Image (spheres, helix red, strand yellow):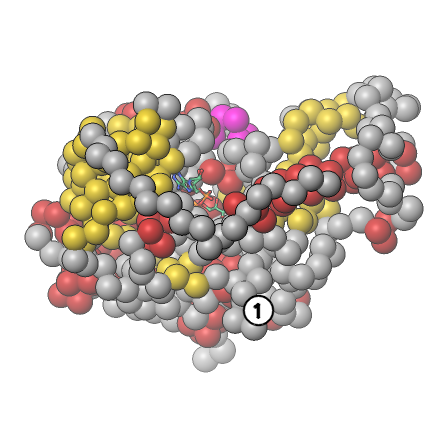
Amino acid sequence: MKRVHSDPSERIPWTKEVPVKQDCDVLVVGGGISGVCAACAAANEGASAILVEHFGVLGGNGTAGGVHGFCGETKGQGHVFDEIVAGLERFNAIAPHRPARSIHLGARRFDHEILALVLQEVCLRHGVVLMLHTRFIDAVRAGAAVSHALVAGKSGIEAIRARMFVDCTGEADVVQAIGCETMKGRPSDGMQLPMSLMFFTRLAGWGRSRRAVPRDFFPWRPFASRDDLPMTSFGRCGLFGRSVKVKVPSFDATSTESLTSAEVQGRRKAMQVLEYYQRAWHKPWELDHVASIIGIREGRRVVGEYVLTVDDVRAGREFDDAVAVGSYPLDAHDPGDDKRTYILPKDQLGVPGYHIPLRSLIPRGTANLLVAGRNLSADQLAMSSARVMATCAMMGTAAGITASMCIKKGLTPTELATAEPAAVREAMAAGGAIFDLAFYTPAQCKKKE
Ligand SMILES: Cc1cc2nc3c(=O)[nH]c(=O)nc-3n(C[C@H](O)[C@H](O)[C@H](O)COP(=O)(O)OP(=O)(O)OC[C@H]3O[C@@H](n4cnc5c(N)ncnc54)[C@H](O)[C@@H]3O)c2cc1C
């Protein structure tokens, strides 16, 4: 194969004046579920809010990534998430609520195409300014504060000035850009939780599939038996459709080269799985579509004012500055192989409800920057639980309220967490958020008195 030239030590100087096209109170970077909730919550508190999203659609993993079920408790996660769920319900596009503590593992299914519509409408209803097809590329720092974000879209590179920034990129791109500390992967070798690619099938008619995957098109050997398959999970999608999730381990979501390989290998593996089911199980399935992006479980995590640990999670720890609640089991798929393997034995995955403190949303050493979502400040195992969408939504809402509150009070997030640790929680509770851990804790995880 021809190699492209690469000399990572080569450097070129690059300086350019860019227009400051936007000025706002709160700039949220990353329009996944956490970013949407952050932007809407900030706007709801009266802040002018801009939401910058790299793709042409909001929702991140939950839409472009094809993940179509909310894990975690879907009641009491704050008013923005309530609005999102209500929007899905208006379309009859979400399964009925069941308390997370009763189903523990499992998701509340929704239609991810409808979610994309609902998210944009909820943002617009709150007056959030959307910038789609816009990628955050760098930030300008003034001491401990961020002054501007540099973004690139079809109009070119431009700067956005904001008083508060919220990084919901999943890979902590903003935090990384200003040189604050981040971490990734497991402590032993830095390997991140594995990615998975979602694809969707439709009914092709009974008997032989009409659109069979050609066995000699791809450079792989067809699977001989079920033992060869990677971890593959099935869901229902529409009347006869299936969603299929295929584990794609050992790639790095923070490396362009590795992420590219993950997408390519993921698509091949998806076709390998489909070919197997068409041939060996005579499934009348054909490819409907593959999710636009591979699902990323873990990118970078920030090192925050507090690092939430798996011990906190297991102990169902409460914090004075709690702003979100997690309760989903430790969903730490083994990063190193493609089978249904976990870092811990399965009987050690369950957790009680636990608090996420505001300090875990504040990157250490910053004055006007917050994070929310899967890039929170947590160790890998704690994050494996807190990364589910309902919990990301609650963190996002908390970050948006915090950003707006800091502007009104003239405090940094750290000062707010110290001086008024309950302020954000109280504001969230007034909007319907539930912080009572008993509401979340499954019977089998209740503390023994
Ligand atoms: C395969 C898989 C299955 C899962 N299953 C479930 C499930 O069943 N239920 C559940 O609740 N959770 C599930 N999860 C977890 C959950 O989907 C994610 O952890 C959650 O959606 C993360 O939300 P987020 O907002 O933090 O990040 P993301 O959804 O990753 O959103 C980040 C957004 O930021 C944007 N972005 C990134 N960088 C930039 C940049 N530089 N500039 C501009 N925009 C940027 C991205 O385009 C993206 O839209 C699953 C995850 C995976 C990968």
Q: Is 29 inside the magenta-drawn segment? A: no
Which residue position is annotated with label 1? 189
Where residue 36 appears, x then y in whole percent? 35, 37
Name the residue located 52 percent from the left edge and 59 percent from the top edge: 384
Write the start and end of the magenta stretch as one range.
110-115
Name the residue located 41 percent from the left edge and 34 percent from the top edge: 54
Nearest the camera: 406 or 188?
188
Q: Where on the picture, by quarter, is residue 42?
A: top left
Question: In this image, 110 relative to 211: left or right?
Answer: left
Asked if residue 105 is positioned above or below residue 15 in the image, the reply reads below
Question: In this image, 384 relative to 152: left or right?
Answer: right
Quadrant holding the N terminus: top right
Quadrant holding the C terminus: bottom left
Name the residue located 21 percent from the left edge and 34 percent from the top edge: 17
Question: Dot 1: what SS?
Answer: loop
Q: Is residue 322 visible?
A: no
User: Which residue sits furthest bottom?
Assistant: 449
Question: In this image, 312 relative to 113: left or right?
Answer: left
Where residue 39 appears, x then y in whole percent? 28, 38
Question: In this image, 177 relative to 10: left or right?
Answer: left
Q: Where on the picture, by quarter, is residue 273?
A: top right
Count neighbours of disc 1 (C-alpha within 10 A) and say few if under 14, some if 14 to 19, many if 20 or more: few
Q: Main secondary structure of the magenta part?
A: helix
